[in-house]
Amino acid sequence: MSAFFKVSGLGVRIGDAAILRNIHLEFREGEVTALLGHNGSGKSTLLKILARQMSPSCGDVSVLGTSFHHTGAREFARTVGYLPQHPPGTDGLTVQELVALGRYPWRGPLGRYNDEDHRLIDQAITDTGLDRFRHRSVDTLSGGERQRAWIAMLLAQQTRCLLLDEPISALDVKHQVETLRLVHRLAEQRELTVVVVLHDVDLAARFCDRLVALKTGELVADGRPREIMDAAMLESIYGVSMGVMERAPGQWVSYVH
């Protein structure tokens, strides 16, 4: 698989604090990658750099072989979709209206939507299981349903990559699993590159192809779930003594001693 993002010598400083230090990473096309680490490890900062919501202090990031410095904002928005941890208010928008905003990078503020736009909007709503909610106000939906509506908007955007910052942090266990199962299914069906910030390492290992861990701004682990779900490896990431059991193939349970 070729690189969707390539991060070279990345560093981020805020005042005297080094948030990220000398990060070298590639995120490959069609792969679902979880960013892991304790609070303050730099994972959300790295995601914001990939989303062009922040600028690095040093180093370079490229998308599909082209440096961010040479990628226009509109072209980037057509390629990469970003869902922050706390999405903006929807101000009474219906699901269909919110999802339709995903066509904005293609049509602009005054563009008229054509049949293809409406087909993509309908397809995104169907793919996320929101058909029966399409005329409901997003504000009236449950947390899990709201997350699906935002993901549908990114799908309507026809991006090739989804960047999701803690998309399950405010959800109960049932909706956490449903959301990650949806993301994994969509990534397979649409051949999407996904980078997702997660706190639950067990769910990350179950639903992601690759786990990347940061600790105090540095890269400390990068591998397949089977490689990362190891007691010594988890202890090095989280700084506490941990154990791991594989209760079924591809389903691990980690615990603190």
Image: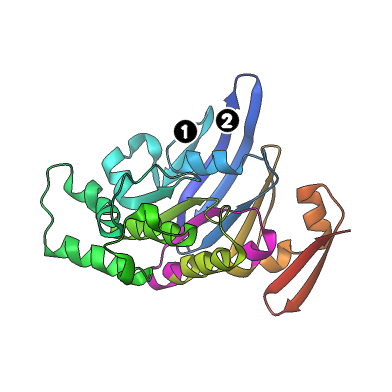
Tell which residue pokes out farthest to the top in this image.
15
- Mark number for residue 12? 2
For the record, the magenta segment spans 186-205
Q: Residue at x 71, y 69 (%)?
A: 226
The image shows residue 103 at horizontal and vertical percentages of 23, 53
Neighbor class of circle 2 (other Cα within 10 Å; few <14, some 14-19, many 20+) is many
In this rendering, does residue 11 appear at all? yes
Q: Quadrant of residue 29?
A: bottom left
Q: Is residue 83 left or right of residue 209?
A: left
Q: Residue at x 66, y 24 (%)?
A: 17
**Is disc 1 placed on a helix, strand or loop?**
loop
Is 49 or 131 nearer to us in this picture?
131
Neighbor class of circle 1 (other Cα within 10 Å; few <14, some 14-19, many 20+) is few
Residue type for callout 1: Met
Residue 218 colored magenta?
Answer: no
The reply to whether dot 1 and dot 2 touch (C-beta < 8 Å) is yes
- What colour scheme governs how the chains and residues are painted in the rendered image of this protein? rainbow
In this rendering, does residue 28 appear at all? no
For label 1, the residue is 54
- Mark number for residue 101? none
